[in-house]
Image (cartoon, coloured by chain):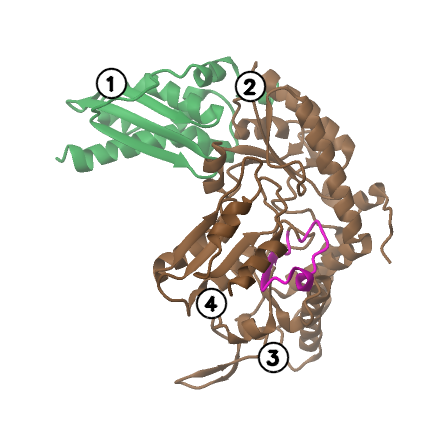
Amino acid sequence: MNGIEQMYQENILDHYKNPRNKGIIKNPSVHHHENNPLCGDELDLYLVIDNHKVIDVKINGHGCAISQASASMLSEQIKGKALEDLKKLAKENILEMLGIPLSPVRLKCALLSLDTLKNSILIYEKYVNKK
Amino acid sequence: MPKTNFEIKNIRKDFPILSRKIRGKQLIYFDSAATSQKPKQVIEAMEDYYKNHNANIHRSIHTLGEEATEAYEKAHEKVADFINAGSYQNIVFTKNTTESLNLLAYSLTADLKKGDEIVISQMEHHSNLVPWQQLAKQRGLKLEFIKIDEEGKLDEESINESITKKTKIVSIMHVSNVLGTINDIKKIGNIAHENNALMVVDGAQSIPHMPVDVKKIDADFYAFSGHKMLGPTGIGVLYGKRELLENMQPFLYGGEMIREVKFEDTKFNDLPWKFEAGTMNIAEAVGLDAAIDYLKKIGMENIQKKDKELTNYTFEKLKEIKDVKIYGPKERGAVVSFNVDEIHAHDVSQILDSEGIAIRAGHHCCMPLMGVLKAHAAARASFYFYNTKDEIDKFANALGKVKKVFRV
Protein backbone atom coordinates (compact mmCIF):
# COMPACT_ATOMS: atom_id res chain seq x y z
CA MET A 1 0.00 0.00 0.00
CA ASN A 2 1.43 3.38 -0.88
CA GLY A 3 0.93 6.54 1.20
CA ILE A 4 -2.27 7.71 -0.37
CA GLU A 5 -4.00 4.35 -0.24
CA GLN A 6 -2.91 4.03 3.36
CA MET A 7 -4.56 7.35 4.14
CA TYR A 8 -7.82 6.39 2.44
CA GLN A 9 -7.88 2.83 3.74
CA GLU A 10 -10.99 0.72 4.03
CA ASN A 11 -12.09 1.64 7.56
CA ILE A 12 -11.64 5.38 6.95
CA LEU A 13 -13.78 5.23 3.81
CA ASP A 14 -16.29 3.02 5.58
CA HIS A 15 -16.77 5.56 8.37
CA TYR A 16 -16.88 8.37 5.81
CA LYS A 17 -19.49 6.72 3.64
CA ASN A 18 -21.50 5.24 6.52
CA PRO A 19 -21.02 7.56 9.46
CA ARG A 20 -22.04 6.09 12.81
CA ASN A 21 -24.39 8.02 15.10
CA LYS A 22 -25.39 10.35 12.29
CA GLY A 23 -28.34 12.61 12.97
CA ILE A 24 -29.60 15.16 15.42
CA ILE A 25 -30.93 15.02 18.96
CA LYS A 26 -33.94 17.26 19.56
CA ASN A 27 -33.34 18.15 23.20
CA PRO A 28 -29.66 17.57 23.83
CA SER A 29 -27.83 18.60 26.98
CA VAL A 30 -25.51 20.48 24.68
CA HIS A 31 -25.27 21.11 20.95
CA HIS A 32 -22.19 22.69 19.42
CA HIS A 33 -21.09 23.55 15.89
CA GLU A 34 -17.50 23.91 14.71
CA ASN A 35 -15.99 24.44 11.31
CA ASN A 36 -12.58 24.40 9.73
CA PRO A 37 -12.50 27.65 7.74
CA LEU A 38 -9.55 26.47 5.70
CA CYS A 39 -11.50 23.90 3.74
CA GLY A 40 -15.07 24.20 4.91
CA ASP A 41 -15.34 21.03 7.02
CA GLU A 42 -18.30 21.37 9.35
CA LEU A 43 -19.51 19.37 12.32
CA ASP A 44 -22.51 19.54 14.63
CA LEU A 45 -22.24 17.52 17.81
CA TYR A 46 -25.24 16.69 20.03
CA LEU A 47 -24.68 15.21 23.47
CA VAL A 48 -27.07 13.94 26.09
CA ILE A 49 -25.25 14.03 29.41
CA ASP A 50 -26.40 12.49 32.65
CA ASN A 51 -24.48 12.36 35.89
CA HIS A 52 -21.34 13.65 34.13
CA LYS A 53 -21.49 10.86 31.58
CA VAL A 54 -22.34 10.95 27.88
CA ILE A 55 -25.37 8.73 27.43
CA ASP A 56 -26.23 9.62 23.85
CA VAL A 57 -24.42 11.22 20.94
CA LYS A 58 -25.25 12.29 17.40
CA ILE A 59 -23.09 13.89 14.78
CA ASN A 60 -24.09 15.80 11.67
CA GLY A 61 -21.62 17.31 9.30
CA HIS A 62 -20.03 17.47 5.92
CA GLY A 63 -16.49 17.77 4.74
CA CYS A 64 -13.51 15.73 3.70
CA ALA A 65 -13.19 12.03 4.38
CA ILE A 66 -10.67 12.55 7.16
CA SER A 67 -12.78 15.02 9.14
CA GLN A 68 -15.99 13.04 8.80
CA ALA A 69 -14.43 9.63 9.46
CA SER A 70 -12.73 11.07 12.52
CA ALA A 71 -16.08 12.37 13.82
CA SER A 72 -17.79 9.04 13.19
CA MET A 73 -15.05 7.06 14.95
CA LEU A 74 -14.93 9.43 17.87
CA SER A 75 -18.71 9.29 18.30
CA GLU A 76 -18.42 5.53 18.81
CA GLN A 77 -15.82 6.01 21.51
CA ILE A 78 -17.50 8.64 23.64
CA LYS A 79 -20.80 7.01 24.42
CA GLY A 80 -20.90 5.94 28.06
CA LYS A 81 -17.71 7.82 28.89
CA ALA A 82 -17.32 10.23 31.80
CA LEU A 83 -16.75 13.89 30.93
CA GLU A 84 -13.61 13.87 33.06
CA ASP A 85 -12.14 11.13 30.87
CA LEU A 86 -13.19 12.79 27.63
CA LYS A 87 -11.53 16.03 28.71
CA LYS A 88 -8.23 14.15 28.82
CA LEU A 89 -8.42 13.09 25.16
CA ALA A 90 -5.53 14.51 23.18
CA LYS A 91 -4.30 14.78 19.62
CA GLU A 92 -2.39 11.53 20.03
CA ASN A 93 -5.56 9.62 20.88
CA ILE A 94 -7.22 10.80 17.68
CA LEU A 95 -4.18 9.91 15.57
CA GLU A 96 -4.08 6.49 17.16
CA MET A 97 -7.81 6.05 16.55
CA LEU A 98 -7.44 6.95 12.85
CA GLY A 99 -4.21 5.00 12.45
CA ILE A 100 -3.11 6.84 9.31
CA PRO A 101 -0.25 9.22 8.50
CA LEU A 102 -1.34 12.87 8.28
CA SER A 103 0.34 16.06 7.13
CA PRO A 104 0.05 19.15 9.37
CA VAL A 105 -2.69 20.59 7.15
CA ARG A 106 -4.78 17.43 7.24
CA LEU A 107 -4.26 17.21 11.00
CA LYS A 108 -6.71 20.12 11.28
CA CYS A 109 -9.32 18.04 9.46
CA ALA A 110 -8.69 15.09 11.76
CA LEU A 111 -8.89 17.18 14.92
CA LEU A 112 -12.15 18.99 14.10
CA SER A 113 -14.08 16.26 15.93
CA LEU A 114 -11.94 16.55 19.05
CA ASP A 115 -12.19 20.35 19.08
CA THR A 116 -15.96 20.12 18.75
CA LEU A 117 -16.17 17.61 21.60
CA LYS A 118 -13.91 19.63 23.90
CA ASN A 119 -15.78 22.86 23.25
CA SER A 120 -19.11 21.10 23.74
CA ILE A 121 -18.00 19.94 27.19
CA LEU A 122 -16.67 23.41 28.02
CA ILE A 123 -19.98 25.01 27.07
CA TYR A 124 -21.91 22.37 28.96
CA GLU A 125 -19.94 22.90 32.13
CA LYS A 126 -19.89 26.68 31.87
CA TYR A 127 -23.47 27.42 30.90
CA VAL A 128 -25.67 24.35 31.19
CA ASN A 129 -24.47 22.56 34.25
CA LYS A 130 -22.82 25.25 36.32
CA LYS A 131 -20.95 23.85 39.25
CA MET B 1 8.18 43.45 -30.65
CA PRO B 2 7.00 40.40 -28.75
CA LYS B 3 7.61 37.07 -30.42
CA THR B 4 4.41 35.69 -31.89
CA ASN B 5 5.23 32.11 -31.06
CA PHE B 6 7.21 31.19 -28.01
CA GLU B 7 9.01 27.97 -27.29
CA ILE B 8 7.42 26.39 -24.24
CA LYS B 9 10.55 24.32 -23.57
CA ASN B 10 12.68 27.44 -23.23
CA ILE B 11 10.14 29.18 -21.06
CA ARG B 12 9.92 26.29 -18.62
CA LYS B 13 13.69 26.43 -18.19
CA ASP B 14 13.29 29.96 -16.82
CA PHE B 15 11.21 28.65 -13.90
CA PRO B 16 13.54 26.63 -11.66
CA ILE B 17 10.73 25.25 -9.48
CA LEU B 18 9.05 23.54 -12.46
CA SER B 19 11.81 20.92 -12.49
CA ARG B 20 11.04 19.93 -8.90
CA LYS B 21 9.96 16.43 -8.05
CA ILE B 22 7.07 15.85 -5.64
CA ARG B 23 6.99 12.38 -4.07
CA GLY B 24 9.22 11.16 -6.87
CA LYS B 25 6.93 12.59 -9.57
CA GLN B 26 7.46 15.60 -11.77
CA LEU B 27 5.66 18.63 -10.27
CA ILE B 28 2.59 19.74 -12.19
CA TYR B 29 1.72 23.19 -10.90
CA PHE B 30 -1.95 24.03 -11.46
CA ASP B 31 -2.32 26.63 -8.74
CA SER B 32 -1.17 29.80 -10.45
CA ALA B 33 -4.40 31.61 -9.59
CA ALA B 34 -3.27 31.37 -5.96
CA THR B 35 0.25 32.47 -6.78
CA SER B 36 2.30 32.15 -9.94
CA GLN B 37 5.75 30.63 -10.04
CA LYS B 38 8.70 32.96 -10.55
CA PRO B 39 11.18 33.01 -13.41
CA LYS B 40 14.87 33.17 -12.56
CA GLN B 41 14.97 36.68 -14.04
CA VAL B 42 12.77 37.89 -11.15
CA ILE B 43 14.65 35.95 -8.50
CA GLU B 44 18.00 37.21 -9.84
CA ALA B 45 16.83 40.82 -10.04
CA MET B 46 15.92 40.74 -6.35
CA GLU B 47 19.15 39.00 -5.45
CA ASP B 48 21.13 41.60 -7.40
CA TYR B 49 19.28 44.38 -5.61
CA TYR B 50 20.19 42.98 -2.19
CA LYS B 51 23.75 42.13 -3.20
CA ASN B 52 24.60 45.40 -4.91
CA HIS B 53 22.11 48.23 -4.34
CA ASN B 54 20.29 47.78 -1.04
CA ALA B 55 19.59 51.01 0.87
CA ASN B 56 16.56 52.88 2.12
CA ILE B 57 14.84 55.06 -0.43
CA HIS B 58 13.99 58.76 -0.66
CA ARG B 59 16.16 59.77 2.29
CA SER B 60 19.75 58.60 1.95
CA ILE B 61 22.15 60.96 0.17
CA HIS B 62 24.64 58.37 -0.93
CA THR B 63 25.14 56.26 -4.03
CA LEU B 64 23.31 53.18 -2.79
CA GLY B 65 20.39 55.29 -1.57
CA GLU B 66 20.16 56.95 -4.94
CA GLU B 67 20.33 53.65 -6.81
CA ALA B 68 17.65 52.10 -4.61
CA THR B 69 15.42 55.15 -5.00
CA GLU B 70 15.85 55.12 -8.75
CA ALA B 71 15.03 51.41 -8.98
CA TYR B 72 11.97 51.84 -6.78
CA GLU B 73 10.63 54.80 -8.75
CA LYS B 74 11.36 53.09 -12.05
CA ALA B 75 9.18 50.18 -10.94
CA HIS B 76 6.26 52.62 -10.63
CA GLU B 77 6.92 53.83 -14.17
CA LYS B 78 7.12 50.26 -15.42
CA VAL B 79 3.73 49.42 -13.92
CA ALA B 80 2.21 52.66 -15.21
CA ASP B 81 3.37 51.86 -18.73
CA PHE B 82 2.21 48.23 -18.44
CA ILE B 83 -1.43 49.18 -17.77
CA ASN B 84 -1.39 52.52 -19.64
CA ALA B 85 -1.92 54.48 -16.43
CA GLY B 86 -0.47 57.69 -17.84
CA SER B 87 2.04 58.47 -15.08
CA TYR B 88 3.90 56.86 -12.19
CA GLN B 89 1.86 59.21 -9.99
CA ASN B 90 -1.22 57.09 -10.69
CA ILE B 91 0.51 54.01 -9.28
CA VAL B 92 0.47 53.33 -5.54
CA PHE B 93 2.39 50.33 -4.25
CA THR B 94 0.76 48.30 -1.50
CA LYS B 95 1.28 44.88 0.01
CA ASN B 96 -1.24 43.13 -2.26
CA THR B 97 -4.70 43.43 -3.86
CA THR B 98 -6.31 43.07 -0.45
CA GLU B 99 -4.44 46.06 0.91
CA SER B 100 -5.24 48.10 -2.20
CA LEU B 101 -8.94 47.36 -1.71
CA ASN B 102 -8.77 48.12 2.02
CA LEU B 103 -7.13 51.44 1.22
CA LEU B 104 -10.08 52.26 -1.04
CA ALA B 105 -12.70 50.97 1.38
CA TYR B 106 -11.35 53.20 4.16
CA SER B 107 -10.55 56.29 2.11
CA LEU B 108 -13.51 56.35 -0.27
CA THR B 109 -16.15 55.78 2.37
CA ALA B 110 -14.83 58.52 4.66
CA ASP B 111 -17.03 61.19 3.07
CA LEU B 112 -20.12 59.08 2.42
CA LYS B 113 -23.39 59.72 4.20
CA LYS B 114 -25.62 57.28 6.04
CA GLY B 115 -27.75 55.37 3.56
CA ASP B 116 -25.34 55.80 0.63
CA GLU B 117 -24.91 52.58 -1.27
CA ILE B 118 -21.97 50.45 -2.34
CA VAL B 119 -22.51 47.81 -5.01
CA ILE B 120 -20.42 44.65 -5.29
CA SER B 121 -21.37 41.18 -6.60
CA GLN B 122 -22.09 37.72 -5.27
CA MET B 123 -18.94 36.35 -6.86
CA GLU B 124 -16.48 38.66 -5.09
CA HIS B 125 -13.41 37.32 -3.32
CA HIS B 126 -13.43 38.02 0.44
CA SER B 127 -10.87 40.77 -0.24
CA ASN B 128 -13.42 42.72 -2.26
CA LEU B 129 -16.29 41.90 0.08
CA VAL B 130 -15.25 42.01 3.72
CA PRO B 131 -13.63 45.52 3.59
CA TRP B 132 -16.80 47.05 2.06
CA GLN B 133 -19.08 45.06 4.34
CA GLN B 134 -17.24 46.14 7.49
CA LEU B 135 -16.88 49.79 6.45
CA ALA B 136 -20.56 49.82 5.50
CA LYS B 137 -21.40 48.58 9.00
CA GLN B 138 -19.17 51.16 10.66
CA ARG B 139 -20.45 54.07 8.61
CA GLY B 140 -24.11 53.16 8.18
CA LEU B 141 -23.84 52.49 4.43
CA LYS B 142 -25.85 49.99 2.46
CA LEU B 143 -24.12 47.14 0.64
CA GLU B 144 -25.89 45.78 -2.45
CA PHE B 145 -24.99 42.60 -4.32
CA ILE B 146 -25.29 42.00 -8.05
CA LYS B 147 -26.61 38.45 -8.43
CA ILE B 148 -25.09 35.77 -10.63
CA ASP B 149 -27.14 33.81 -13.15
CA GLU B 150 -27.29 30.04 -13.66
CA GLU B 151 -24.25 30.08 -15.90
CA GLY B 152 -22.13 31.95 -13.38
CA LYS B 153 -22.18 35.35 -15.06
CA LEU B 154 -23.33 38.63 -13.54
CA ASP B 155 -27.07 38.92 -14.12
CA GLU B 156 -27.78 41.82 -16.51
CA GLU B 157 -31.04 42.73 -14.85
CA SER B 158 -29.46 42.64 -11.42
CA ILE B 159 -26.67 44.98 -12.59
CA ASN B 160 -29.23 47.54 -13.73
CA GLU B 161 -31.34 47.16 -10.60
CA SER B 162 -28.44 47.35 -8.16
CA ILE B 163 -26.67 50.44 -9.52
CA THR B 164 -28.83 53.52 -8.90
CA LYS B 165 -28.51 57.20 -8.08
CA LYS B 166 -27.95 56.16 -4.46
CA THR B 167 -24.85 54.19 -5.46
CA LYS B 168 -21.55 55.89 -4.67
CA ILE B 169 -19.10 53.07 -5.29
CA VAL B 170 -19.22 49.98 -7.52
CA SER B 171 -16.47 47.41 -6.92
CA ILE B 172 -16.29 44.33 -9.13
CA MET B 173 -13.71 41.67 -9.94
CA HIS B 174 -12.49 41.63 -13.54
CA VAL B 175 -12.12 37.83 -13.65
CA SER B 176 -13.61 35.44 -11.08
CA ASN B 177 -11.09 33.27 -9.20
CA VAL B 178 -13.68 30.50 -8.85
CA LEU B 179 -15.97 30.64 -11.86
CA GLY B 180 -13.45 32.08 -14.29
CA THR B 181 -16.14 34.50 -15.49
CA ILE B 182 -14.71 37.48 -17.36
CA ASN B 183 -16.88 40.41 -16.35
CA ASP B 184 -17.62 43.26 -18.75
CA ILE B 185 -16.26 45.84 -16.36
CA LYS B 186 -16.23 48.59 -18.94
CA LYS B 187 -19.97 48.25 -19.38
CA ILE B 188 -20.57 48.09 -15.62
CA GLY B 189 -18.27 51.09 -15.22
CA ASN B 190 -20.35 53.04 -17.73
CA ILE B 191 -23.49 52.33 -15.72
CA ALA B 192 -21.67 53.35 -12.54
CA HIS B 193 -20.49 56.59 -14.12
CA GLU B 194 -23.96 57.41 -15.49
CA ASN B 195 -25.07 57.27 -11.86
CA ASN B 196 -22.12 59.36 -10.66
CA ALA B 197 -20.62 56.40 -8.84
CA LEU B 198 -16.96 55.40 -8.78
CA MET B 199 -15.84 52.21 -10.51
CA VAL B 200 -13.34 50.04 -8.65
CA VAL B 201 -11.95 46.93 -10.33
CA ASP B 202 -10.33 43.96 -8.55
CA GLY B 203 -7.83 42.91 -11.21
CA ALA B 204 -6.03 40.17 -9.27
CA GLN B 205 -7.03 37.42 -11.73
CA SER B 206 -7.04 39.47 -14.93
CA ILE B 207 -3.74 41.33 -14.94
CA PRO B 208 -1.55 38.18 -15.16
CA HIS B 209 -3.48 36.80 -18.13
CA MET B 210 -4.58 39.56 -20.51
CA PRO B 211 -3.57 42.98 -21.76
CA VAL B 212 -5.15 45.58 -19.47
CA ASP B 213 -5.52 49.22 -20.44
CA VAL B 214 -7.01 51.13 -17.52
CA LYS B 215 -7.77 54.15 -19.70
CA LYS B 216 -9.67 52.08 -22.24
CA ILE B 217 -11.62 50.38 -19.45
CA ASP B 218 -12.11 53.79 -17.85
CA ALA B 219 -11.80 52.32 -14.35
CA ASP B 220 -11.45 54.87 -11.58
CA PHE B 221 -9.37 52.41 -9.57
CA TYR B 222 -7.73 49.12 -10.49
CA ALA B 223 -6.16 46.84 -7.86
CA PHE B 224 -3.84 43.86 -8.34
CA SER B 225 -1.01 41.80 -6.82
CA GLY B 226 2.52 41.25 -8.05
CA HIS B 227 2.75 37.64 -6.93
CA LYS B 228 0.14 36.33 -9.36
CA MET B 229 2.00 37.87 -12.33
CA LEU B 230 5.44 36.27 -11.84
CA GLY B 231 6.47 38.86 -9.24
CA PRO B 232 7.29 38.30 -5.58
CA THR B 233 4.82 38.31 -2.70
CA GLY B 234 4.53 41.50 -0.66
CA ILE B 235 3.99 43.92 -3.53
CA GLY B 236 0.59 45.02 -4.78
CA VAL B 237 -0.65 47.88 -6.89
CA LEU B 238 -3.43 50.39 -6.74
CA TYR B 239 -4.02 52.42 -9.87
CA GLY B 240 -6.21 55.48 -9.43
CA LYS B 241 -7.25 58.47 -11.50
CA ARG B 242 -5.17 61.42 -10.46
CA GLU B 243 -7.89 63.83 -9.31
CA LEU B 244 -9.44 61.09 -7.22
CA LEU B 245 -6.18 60.09 -5.54
CA GLU B 246 -5.40 63.73 -4.88
CA ASN B 247 -8.66 64.30 -3.06
CA MET B 248 -8.47 61.13 -1.00
CA GLN B 249 -7.33 60.96 2.60
CA PRO B 250 -4.27 58.70 3.07
CA PHE B 251 -4.94 55.25 4.50
CA LEU B 252 -1.69 54.73 6.40
CA TYR B 253 0.16 57.53 8.17
CA GLY B 254 3.84 57.76 9.08
CA GLY B 255 7.20 58.41 7.54
CA GLU B 256 7.73 59.02 3.83
CA MET B 257 4.09 59.94 3.13
CA ILE B 258 4.61 63.43 4.57
CA ARG B 259 5.84 66.75 3.21
CA GLU B 260 5.96 68.69 6.44
CA VAL B 261 5.12 67.65 9.99
CA LYS B 262 4.39 69.96 12.91
CA PHE B 263 3.19 68.92 16.33
CA GLU B 264 -0.34 70.00 15.50
CA ASP B 265 -0.71 69.10 11.81
CA THR B 266 0.87 67.46 8.75
CA LYS B 267 1.11 68.28 5.06
CA PHE B 268 1.07 65.12 2.98
CA ASN B 269 3.53 64.18 0.27
CA ASP B 270 2.84 64.26 -3.50
CA LEU B 271 1.31 61.34 -5.36
CA PRO B 272 1.91 58.47 -5.17
CA TRP B 273 4.09 58.70 -2.05
CA LYS B 274 1.23 60.14 0.00
CA PHE B 275 -0.18 56.59 0.08
CA GLU B 276 3.12 54.80 0.74
CA ALA B 277 3.87 55.17 4.44
CA GLY B 278 7.01 53.76 6.02
CA THR B 279 9.76 51.82 4.32
CA MET B 280 8.13 49.97 1.47
CA ASN B 281 8.98 46.58 -0.06
CA ILE B 282 11.78 47.86 -2.25
CA ALA B 283 13.29 44.56 -3.39
CA GLU B 284 9.78 43.35 -4.19
CA ALA B 285 9.21 46.43 -6.36
CA VAL B 286 12.42 45.54 -8.21
CA GLY B 287 11.11 41.98 -8.59
CA LEU B 288 7.80 43.23 -9.97
CA ASP B 289 9.68 45.41 -12.45
CA ALA B 290 11.56 42.33 -13.69
CA ALA B 291 8.31 40.34 -13.83
CA ILE B 292 6.74 42.94 -16.12
CA ASP B 293 9.83 42.85 -18.35
CA TYR B 294 9.39 39.10 -18.62
CA LEU B 295 5.66 39.32 -19.38
CA LYS B 296 6.30 41.97 -22.02
CA LYS B 297 9.01 39.88 -23.60
CA ILE B 298 6.52 37.08 -24.14
CA GLY B 299 3.67 39.45 -24.90
CA MET B 300 0.35 39.63 -23.08
CA GLU B 301 -1.58 38.69 -26.23
CA ASN B 302 0.50 35.51 -26.52
CA ILE B 303 -0.04 34.72 -22.86
CA GLN B 304 -3.78 35.26 -23.22
CA LYS B 305 -3.89 32.96 -26.24
CA LYS B 306 -1.87 30.21 -24.56
CA ASP B 307 -3.86 30.38 -21.29
CA LYS B 308 -7.08 30.17 -23.26
CA GLU B 309 -5.85 27.11 -25.13
CA LEU B 310 -4.94 25.33 -21.88
CA THR B 311 -8.20 26.29 -20.19
CA ASN B 312 -10.38 25.19 -23.09
CA TYR B 313 -8.47 21.93 -23.35
CA THR B 314 -9.04 21.25 -19.64
CA PHE B 315 -12.70 22.16 -19.92
CA GLU B 316 -13.17 19.63 -22.73
CA LYS B 317 -11.11 16.95 -20.94
CA LEU B 318 -13.06 17.28 -17.69
CA LYS B 319 -16.39 17.23 -19.50
CA GLU B 320 -15.47 13.76 -20.76
CA ILE B 321 -15.06 12.41 -17.24
CA LYS B 322 -18.21 11.05 -15.69
CA ASP B 323 -19.38 12.64 -12.42
CA VAL B 324 -17.22 15.74 -12.78
CA LYS B 325 -19.17 18.95 -12.24
CA ILE B 326 -17.60 22.14 -13.59
CA TYR B 327 -18.58 25.56 -12.24
CA GLY B 328 -18.87 28.70 -14.34
CA PRO B 329 -19.28 29.62 -18.01
CA LYS B 330 -17.37 28.14 -20.95
CA GLU B 331 -15.87 31.49 -21.93
CA ARG B 332 -13.52 32.02 -19.00
CA GLY B 333 -10.19 33.04 -17.52
CA ALA B 334 -7.46 30.52 -16.72
CA VAL B 335 -9.27 28.67 -13.92
CA VAL B 336 -11.46 25.57 -13.88
CA SER B 337 -13.30 24.81 -10.63
CA PHE B 338 -14.92 21.43 -10.28
CA ASN B 339 -16.06 18.64 -8.02
CA VAL B 340 -15.68 14.91 -8.55
CA ASP B 341 -18.82 12.97 -7.64
CA GLU B 342 -19.51 13.50 -3.91
CA ILE B 343 -15.81 13.41 -3.03
CA HIS B 344 -14.68 16.41 -1.01
CA ALA B 345 -12.30 18.76 -2.82
CA HIS B 346 -9.73 18.35 -0.07
CA ASP B 347 -9.55 14.65 -0.69
CA VAL B 348 -9.33 15.21 -4.45
CA SER B 349 -6.45 17.59 -3.89
CA GLN B 350 -4.67 15.20 -1.53
CA ILE B 351 -4.85 12.33 -3.99
CA LEU B 352 -3.66 14.53 -6.88
CA ASP B 353 -0.76 15.66 -4.71
CA SER B 354 0.33 12.04 -4.45
CA GLU B 355 0.74 12.26 -8.25
CA GLY B 356 2.77 15.46 -7.99
CA ILE B 357 -0.15 17.64 -9.09
CA ALA B 358 -0.81 20.86 -7.17
CA ILE B 359 -4.35 22.22 -7.31
CA ARG B 360 -6.34 24.33 -4.88
CA ALA B 361 -9.21 23.01 -2.81
CA GLY B 362 -11.66 24.72 -0.50
CA HIS B 363 -13.92 27.74 -0.63
CA HIS B 364 -11.35 29.89 -2.46
CA CYS B 365 -11.95 32.87 -0.17
CA CYS B 366 -15.46 33.07 -1.62
CA MET B 367 -17.66 31.60 1.11
CA PRO B 368 -20.80 33.58 0.11
CA LEU B 369 -20.38 32.52 -3.53
CA MET B 370 -19.98 28.87 -2.53
CA GLY B 371 -23.30 29.23 -0.72
CA VAL B 372 -24.95 30.50 -3.91
CA LEU B 373 -23.41 27.59 -5.85
CA LYS B 374 -24.65 25.19 -3.13
CA ALA B 375 -21.16 23.71 -2.90
CA HIS B 376 -19.33 23.35 0.39
CA ALA B 377 -16.01 23.31 -1.40
CA ALA B 378 -14.57 22.94 -4.86
CA ALA B 379 -11.32 21.83 -6.41
CA ARG B 380 -9.66 24.30 -8.76
CA ALA B 381 -7.05 23.84 -11.44
CA SER B 382 -5.56 27.11 -12.66
CA PHE B 383 -3.05 27.68 -15.40
CA TYR B 384 -0.34 29.92 -16.69
CA PHE B 385 1.57 30.00 -19.95
CA TYR B 386 4.27 27.70 -18.54
CA ASN B 387 1.80 24.80 -18.32
CA THR B 388 1.37 22.22 -21.07
CA LYS B 389 -1.36 20.04 -22.57
CA ASP B 390 0.67 17.02 -21.55
CA GLU B 391 0.33 18.10 -17.93
CA ILE B 392 -3.43 18.42 -18.41
CA ASP B 393 -3.58 14.86 -19.80
CA LYS B 394 -1.75 13.59 -16.70
CA PHE B 395 -4.12 15.60 -14.51
CA ALA B 396 -7.18 14.10 -16.21
CA ASN B 397 -5.75 10.60 -15.75
CA ALA B 398 -5.05 11.30 -12.08
CA LEU B 399 -8.71 12.21 -11.57
CA GLY B 400 -9.44 8.60 -12.47
CA LYS B 401 -7.25 7.56 -9.58
CA VAL B 402 -9.30 9.75 -7.23
CA LYS B 403 -12.38 7.68 -7.98
CA LYS B 404 -10.40 4.48 -7.66
CA VAL B 405 -9.05 5.42 -4.21
CA PHE B 406 -12.59 6.27 -3.10
CA ARG B 407 -13.98 3.15 -4.73
CA VAL B 408 -16.70 5.02 -6.61
Residue at image coords 75%, 47%: B304
Q: Which chain is green?
A: A
Q: Judge depth for marks 1 and 4 and give the one in front.
A: 4
Q: Quadrant of the C terminus of chain B?
A: top right
Q: Which chain is brown?
A: B
Residue at image coords 71%, 27%: B317
Above/below status of B364 relative to B220: above
Chain letter for mark 2, please. Answer: A
* Residue at the disc numbered 1: A56
Res A6 label:
2
Chain letter for mark 4, please. Answer: B
* Residue at the disc numbered 4: B107
Residue type for callout 4: Ser
- Along the line of sight, the residue nearer the viewer: B279 or A33: A33
Tell me residue B276's x, y (percent).
Answer: 55, 70
How far is disc 1 from disc 2 in space, using C-alphas? 32 Å
